[in-house]
Image (cartoon, rainbow, N blue to C red):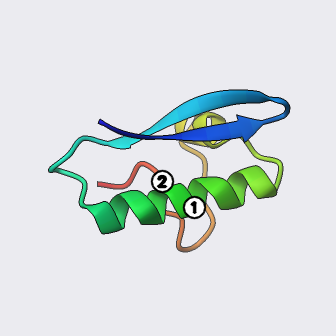
Amino acid sequence: MVAVPLPHLGNERMLSLGVYPEVSLKQARDRRDAARKLVADGVDPSDVRKAGAQRPQGCVLGAR
């Protein structure tokens, strides 16, 4: 499993980016960057994934 720590509102959480080798290093990095952008915008990436909400263009979080 590829995971990244996300400091969000004062507490650190982990977000799974996928399972290697199904997720390439480039895909994992793209997903990490998308998650960091969401955090910078004040949005919890795991809530976005759970809600299945419309993601911003270029956001590949949870894409397969």
> Could you say which is closer to the camera, residue 3 or residue 61?
3
Circle 1: residue type? Ala
5 vs 61: above or below: above
Measuring 84% from the left and 30% from the top, which residue is drawn there? Answer: 10
Q: How crowded is mark 1: few (under 14 residues within 10 Å), some or many (20 or more)?
A: some
The residue most toward the left is 21
Q: Which residue type does callout 2 highlight?
A: Leu
> Which residue position is annotated with label 2?
61
Contact between marks 2 and 1 (CB within 8 A): the answer is yes
- Name the image quarter holding the C terminus: bottom left
* 5 sits to left or right of 64: right
Q: Earlier in the sequence, mark 2 or mark 1?
A: 1
Secondary element type, mark 1: helix
Which residue is rendered at x = 48% and y = 53% of the image? 61
C-alpha separation, residue under disc 2 versus residue under disc 1: 7 Å
Query: Measured from the top left, where is residue 37 in percent x and y?
Result: 69, 61
Q: Which residue is identified by label 1?
A: 34
Left or right: residue 50 compared with residue 19: right
Q: Point out residue 1 in the picture as x, y percentages from the top left corner.
A: 29, 36
